[in-house]
Amino acid sequence: MLRRGSVSSSTSSTGSCRASKSALRQVPRVETLLDLQRTHGNSFVQRLVQHKLAISTATGVITRQPQPPPSPDPGWSDAPQKGLNQWVTTVDEKGNIVPGKAATKGVWRVPVEGLIHGLQKGDKGPAFESPGGRAVALIPNTVTPTASDKDNVPIDVLFHLHGHGVGYRELEPGKSDRPGVLKPGQLRDVELYQMEQQLLSHVAVSKRLLIAVLPQGSEWARFGDLSSNSDAYLKEVFAKLVPKYLPKGAIPGRVIVSGHSGAGPTAMEIAAKAGKRTDVLLFDAINSACVKEEKKVDGKTELDKDGHPVMVCKSPKVCTSNEYGTVRDWVTNKMTADVQSLSGKTEAEKKSELQANGTRFRGFTSESLTTKDTCSYGHWYNKVKNDIETTITKLKVSQGVADQLRQNYQVRQVQGPHERVMGQGNLETALKD
């Protein structure tokens, strides 16, 4: 970009260039232009401008104008012009978004498309972009991964699934998604989850690279075949990130499956099918549904137009949760397996083994753990918390092992509200060992 008071030079004769350089060393900027015009004529000055050689006002020497920075790498092909998903961007610790893969401290936000696993079809709804075959990768640029051998560079992955809404797409002006919190011009991962900011803080403390892969799902938190093909999905994403954003040989290492709200079922399906250690973070993701009963009018069952009983929520309202049973079974089975793996070890070795290799579970809810309301997240999270204590008692472990199990398997009530439950430092807290 040319600054005010600068001009450009052409491939003029050697004598003219010497004369102009001599004049520039002695004459201020405005006078320089006038002097060149008087000495060499209008056509000479015009050629200077056309061929983009700038006059340095500090040294008085003609220098070549710096080339403009290259355009950022493209993001999603149907993102709007000047949209937040049109390009690869960098997000800093304050949530500021700048174009391109910046070298300054931050997290590279890389929109990925063309994936053959995960959600493949879906309506745009209130968003600009379509959801099929899409993901966003978040890569902190402050930590360098280390190779485990000459060929492989395992990198830890936070594999997060969004809840109901447009996910990581951008809302069209004047529109809102189902939760009604995200605004046009905002990104869920930056504004609501504060994921980039928390990732950056986490890797600064841990000194270990952790990237996030964020599959784009439907507005109802559906993710296609992700529950049965999560390994293939991650390999696909990594293939698109190497070598420009991740080093050659980068492969998924330890995987932390995370789910918010309606993504809970898919997150647990992924975790249950994983063949290696997979940690789980659930943010308001153990859902419930009301127990239904037939609607009665004057003691008689009301029928719909097809002759079927009209079903309504039981009064007083009572909820149940199929997801709770899945989470309970996964947690208790993993805790039991962790303890069984300690057989033959000394007390000190047992605690050290659990610290280094024990499974991690974090259940964070924005609702009260003491509520009696069965339709509340807090009710079901509290049941999991009680299940953890019951399992520890049944396993009959030492106090040291019990304390480490409580550290590895946690349920907490944290600051909300629901759509922002991953923000406010809660994700970073959940990632701590």
Image (spheres, helix red, strand yellow):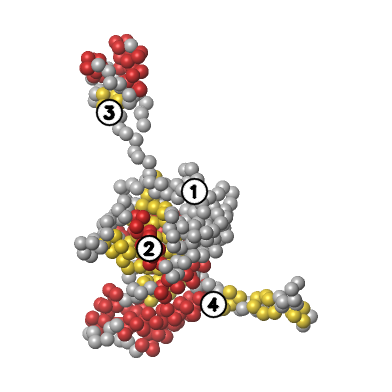
- Label for residue 78? 1
Element assignment for label 2? helix
Of the numbered discs 4 and 3, the one sitting upstream in the chain is 3
Residue farthest right in this picture? 298
> Which corner quadrant of the image does residue 288 belong to?
bottom right
Of the numbered discs 4 and 1, the one sitting upstream in the chain is 1
Q: Nearer the viewer, residue 93 or 313?
A: 313
Element assignment for label 4? loop
Of the numbered discs 4 and 2, the one sitting upstream in the chain is 2
Measured in 3D between alpha carbons, the distance from the residue under mark 1 to the one under mark 3, in whole angstroms, is: 37 Å
Q: Residues within 10 Å of mark 2 (few under 14, many from 20)?
A: many
Q: Nearer the viewer, residue 353 or 225?
A: 225
Q: Nearer the viewer, mark 4 or mark 1?
A: 1
What residue type is disc 3 on? Answer: Arg
- The residue indicated by pointer 3 is 64
Of the numbered discs 1 and 3, the one sitting upstream in the chain is 3
Q: Residue at x 34, y 82 (%)?
A: 337
- Label for residue 197? none
* 275, above or below 419, in the image: below
Quadrant for the N terminus, please.
top left
What residue type is disc 1 on? Answer: Asp
Q: Residue at x 47, y 67 (%)?
A: 225
Left or right for 241, reference 300: left
- Label for residue 321? 4
Q: Residues within 10 Å of mark 4 (few under 14, many from 20)?
A: some
